[in-house]
Amino acid sequence: MAHIELRDLDDDDLDAVFEMMRDPQSVEMAAFTASDPDDRAAFDAWIARERGSDAVTLFVVTERGGFAGTAAVFTVDGDREVTFWIARHAWARGVATSALRLLIAREPIRPLFARTAAGNTRALAVLEKCGFTEVSRTTSFAPGVRREVEEVLLTLLPALDGA
């Protein structure tokens, strides 16, 4: 497996992140995305808000030093939540699993939460490999696919002492 690292997001990464997040197959899998993935002005405004928020820690995932995706930890209603998005060229090689393991090792707060579209079986498998378990399912409108989609909420609980 290739060497995977997390590093801070730089301005030079923004074009790669935008292109990754507008890939039609990726948008279909993620579902809960921007309503218009091709709107660069909306992307720029969103990423500026994310980068400027104290509640968000955003990383670039690299594979052998090259761009392979993004990973982040953020706060929603007082809960810490993780997210990751891996570029299609890096799929099916363990990049997501390695990146998520690095991310959760950096985040001390537990429980830690994650959400994914129920149909995104790859993301569900990665989350489960990393110790997340399903908490609940809800159905809501997913802007990226313009329809109702089932979303899975998962959690990573604190390790038991002596485990």
Image (cartoon, rainbow, N blue to C red):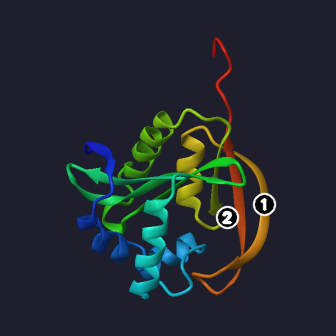
Could you tell me which residue is drawn at 34 percent across and 77 percent down?
A: 19
Could you tell me which residue is drawn at 47 percent across and 83 percent down?
A: 42
Q: Are marks 1 and 2 in contact (CB under 8 Å)?
A: yes
Of all residues shown, which one is farthest toward the left? 65
**Which residue matches tag 1?**
137
Position above or below: 138 against 41:
above
Q: Amino acid at mark 1?
A: Arg
Q: Residues within 10 Å of mark 1 (few under 14, many from 20)?
A: some
Could you say which is closer to the camera, residue 149 or residue 161? 161
Could you tell me which residue is drawn at 41 percent across and 46 percent down?
A: 99
Q: Position of residue 87 (x, y in %)?
A: 36, 65
Could you say which is closer to the camera, residue 25 or residue 9? 9
Q: Which mark is residue 118?
A: 2
Name which of mark 1 and mark 2 comes first in the sequence.
2
Q: Residues within 10 Å of mark 2 (few under 14, many from 20)?
A: many
* Viewport quadrant of the C terminus: top right
Specify whether 19 is left or right of 139: left
Q: Position of residue 23 (x, y in %)?
A: 40, 79
Q: Amino acid at mark 2?
A: Ala
Could you say which is closer to the camera, residue 14 or residue 126? 14
Could you say which is closer to the camera, residue 103 or residue 120? 103
Could you tell me which residue is drawn at 65 percent across and 35 percent down?
A: 110
Q: Which mark is residue 62?
A: none
Q: Quadrant of residue 2?
A: top left
Position above or below: 63 against 31:
above
